[in-house]
Amino acid sequence: MRGLGGGILGGLLGGMLFSSLGFGGMGSGFGGSGIGIIEILLLLGLGYFIFKMVRGRKRAENLEYQTSYQQQGRQTEAFPSYGSESRTQEEDTSDGIRHIREMDPHFDEGQFKETAMDMFFKIQGAWMNRNLSGVQGLLTDEMKGIVQRDIDALLRDKKVNHLENIAVRKVEIVEIWQESGQDFLTVLFTANLLDYTSDDSTGEILEGSKTDPVRFEEFWTFTRPVGNNPWRLSAINQQT
C-alpha cells in the first residue's frame, strides 16, 4: 500500500501493536487494555476495504486507457510498443543495391533499367511472333516453359496476340533481394500500347482494339547468380 491509504493503515497498526506491548500507557487501544480480537477484525476489514478501493481505481484507469487506444485504431494492449517503425521502399531498395554491389561493384541502377527495357521489348516481340528462339537466353527455364505453353495455345487456336505502339512511361525498381546464391530484382513497367487478338486465318479482331490504346502496369522479376552475370526473366505479374 502506498500513498494516503498506506499511511493511515500503517499508523493504526503501529498504534495497536505498541499499545498491546505496553508502550501506549493506560487506556490505550480500542479496549483500553491492549489489542483484542475485535480490533484485529476491524483492522483486517479496514485494510481489505482500502485494498479493494485502490485496485478498483487502477482497473478503471487501465480500462479507460485501453478503450482510448481501441477507439483510435491502435494496438489494444495497455502500453504502446516501440521500435516497430516500418522501413520505406527507397531504404529497402538502397540496401538491396548495396548488397548486390558487394559481389558486383560495377552494378549501376540506371544501366540495369536500360537492360531491363531492352529485354522487355525483345520478349514482347517474341511473344507477338509466337517464337522464342531469339530470346532463349533471356528467360529462366521455368519462365521459358510457361511462355511456350501460352504460345502453343495461340498456335493451336490459330490466334495472334498483337502488342503494338508500345510507349513505356516509367521503369521503376521496386524490390531487390538475394536468396540461395541468386540476385532478384523486380521492375515495375508502366506503359501504353495497342493490345488485341486476331484470327490467324481471317485477320478478324477477336479481343481488344486496334485503335484504342490501353494503359498497363506489370512487375517483371529478373534473376541471376550472385555477381557480374547476365540477368534472365523469372516472373511477370500484372498490377491489379
Image (cartoon, rainbow, N blue to C red):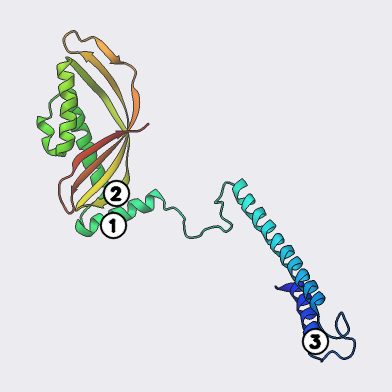
> At numbered mark 3, what does the secondary structure look like: helix, strand or loop?
helix
21 displayed left or right of 111: right
| Residue beneath the point at 29% across and 49% down | 176
> At numbered mark 1, what does the secondary structure look like: helix, strand or loop?
helix
| Residue 187, image quadrant | top left
Please tell me whether mark 3 or mark 2 is closer to you in this view.
Answer: 3
82 displayed left or right of 10: left
| Residue sticking out furthest to the top | 202
Real-space CA distance between mark 3 and mark 2, rounded to the nearest whole angstrom:
79 Å
**Circle 3 residue:** 20
- Say the numbered circle drawn on residue 98: 1
Mark 1 or mark 3, which has the lower sequence index? 3
Q: Report whether residue 30 is seen.
A: yes
**Circle 2 residue:** 176
Q: Report whether residue 139 is seen.
A: no
The residue nearer to you, when weighing 167 against 83, is 83
Residue 17 vertical position relative to residue 209 in the rendered view, above or below: below
| Mark 1: amino acid | Arg
Residue 236 on image: x %, y %: 26, 35
